[in-house]
Image (cartoon, helix red, strand yellow):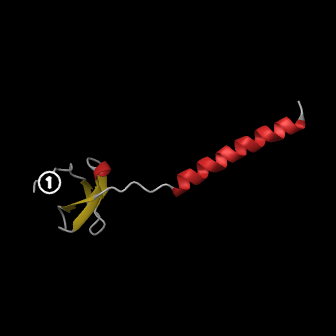
Amino acid sequence: MDTTLVLLALGAVLATAAGVWVYLRLRKPKEEPFYHFRCPGCKRRLRYRARQAGHAGECSNCGRALTFPPVTASID
């Protein structure tokens, strides 16, 4: 194969990879709201994200194992 063709193909691949990397680095992060509940042990107010609901966790104050409660729709 011609080395010029190989170098052009390699350059195209590298330019595409660099473009994807720049796009991923510069896009805005997804904003997700925080929800709150009280630790059943020490009553400290803890915050969590909706994706953590139902998963196990630990209180940062007393160390008690807990499960994040389901997110409830707030009624205004």
Question: What is the quadrant of the N terminus in the image?
Answer: top right
Q: Position of residue 4 (x, y in %)?
A: 87, 39
Relative side of 23 to 46, left or right: right
Please give the name of the residue rendered at 22% of the width and 61% of the height, measured from the top-left corner.
36
Q: Residue at the left extreme?
A: 76
Relative side of 30 to 47, left or right: right
Q: Residue at the top extreme?
A: 1
Q: Residue at the right extreme?
A: 2
Please give the name of the residue rendered at 43% of the width and 56% of the height, measured from the top-left corner.
29
Q: Position of residue 71 (x, y in %)?
A: 21, 50
Please give the name of the residue rendered at 77% of the width and 41% of the height, measured from the top-left corner.
10
Relative side of 19 to 32, left or right: right
How many badges with numbers are in the image? 1
The picture quadrant where one finds residue 60 is bottom left
Instruction: Decide which of 2, 39 is in the foreground and name it.
Output: 2
Residue bearing mark 1: 74
- Count residues near mark 1 (Cα–Cα under 10 Å), then give few for <14, some for 14-19, many for 20+: few
Q: Position of residue 66 (x, y in %)?
A: 25, 55
The picture quadrant where one finds residue 44 is bottom left
Question: What is the quadrant of the C terminus in the image?
Answer: bottom left
Asked which secondary structure carries label 1, the reply is loop
Relative side of 7 to 20, left or right: right
